[in-house]
Amino acid sequence: MGACFSKVFNGCPLKIHCAVTWILPKTRDQYLILGAEEGIYTLNLNELHEDTLEKLLPQRCTWLYVMNNVLMSVSGKSSQICSHNLTALFEQRGHLQKKHGSLSLSTNRFTDRIIHRKFAISVKISDTKGCRRCSVARNPYTDSTFLCGAVPTGLVLLLWYEPLQKFMYLKHIAIKLPDSLPVFELLVLVTDEFPQLCVGVRECRGASTATDHQLKFDIIELNGSLVSAPGDGALRAVQVTQLDRDTILIAAEKTVKVVDLQGFPSRELTAEITFDFPVETLVCLQDSVLVFWKHGLKGRSFHSDEVTQEITDESRVFRVLGTNRDIILQSTPTDDPSALSNLYILTGHESSY
């Protein structure tokens, strides 16, 4: 196995929060889409010789997710969940670029406004202002995809509706959320139509030896039933990821813990995988876990705990921008954090699970 950072852009000036990739159906070109303080930008990965970032939307953006040809974002001054028709956005951009030379400035603005209204290219989702975290999960047993967002008044839950190719507003759950939400992950249960929301992990304080190593998830039930209230013994978890129907991975400090939905250590896989650095992001592969830290990545087998791949470069500080479909990273010089950044897509690491 040979994981490597494939550089796609050198010297990026943007303050980037997140990134996704998407394939334009008409041309089959793959695009990198960046959510940044300065707006939403795109880079054609099939034309890297052009070395050009193009502004798609001017609004500040902190979160992105692509579903088919729809881009979901948390964007704008009010940090609102928005839905964007990517195909129409790209067609509009091409149309305006072609016409720009022959249109006066005022006519160009007018055309832009008419196209927006006619095709409803970007739509703000109501009651989602002030959104600070989002999570998306697909229930493979019902083939439903849910989007959950944390807003000042609680939670909003959206459901993907295939005939209309859009996320539909499903419900609002009034609840006081923790001030800090380092963990915000939807977990799917075989028996439930709706997913559960995990907002933390803690150790069980039990006298019994059998429960000494059990962990408890701080769960919010999205079907309206009881909430598991946070307690003492919280782990410093930075990520919770569901591997399969009854396996959860928890990244906390220098370890990845592998447990079932009840929080008991896994019997089939290595229950605790230890690293010699603080884990910042984890990605599940077919037979191993890939973890990222400030100077690179390391992969370890779920079964043997052996190192499967490793990249270390202490001259650069790396940050994962996105792991949906492709793994996208950003790096800056260790001795100059404010320098322009480089952007990469991870290749040769196996397919994500």
Image (cartoon, helix red, strand yellow):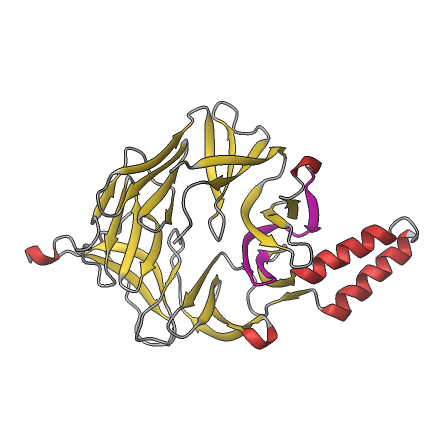
Residue 242 is one of the magenta-drawn residues: no
Q: Name which residue lies at 68% across and 54% down.
A: 27
Q: Main secondary structure of the magenta part?
A: strand
The quarter in which the C terminus is drawn is bottom left
Q: Nearer the viewer, residue 200 or 83?
A: 83
**Where 113 sits versus 316, above or below?**
below
Residue 68 is one of the magenta-drawn residues: yes
Q: Nearer the viewer, residue 314 or 110?
A: 314
**Where 246 sits versus 164, above or below?**
above
Q: In this rendering, would 116 be left or right of 313? A: right
Q: Position of residue 141 (x, y in %)?
A: 37, 73
Q: Name which residue lies at 71% across and 56% down.
A: 90
Q: Nearer the viewer, residue 105 or 343?
A: 343
Residue 63 shows in the view: yes
Q: In this rendering, would 206 be left or right of 225? A: left
**Where 327 sits versus 111, above or below?**
above
Q: Position of residue 134 (x, y in %)?
A: 47, 59
Which region of the structure is painted magenta?
52-74
Q: Position of residue 329 (x, y in %)?
A: 50, 40
Residue 207 shows in the view: no
Residue at the far left in the pictured view:
208
Q: Name which residue lies at 41% across and 31% down.
A: 295
Q: How many marks?
A: 0
Q: In this rendering, would 88 be left or right of 305? A: right
Q: Position of residue 152 (x, y in %)?
A: 49, 63
The quarter in which the N terminus is drawn is top left
Query: Residue 185 falls in which quadrant of the image?
Result: bottom left
Q: In this rendering, would 317 be left or right of 22? A: left
**Where 248 sits versus 128, above or below?**
above
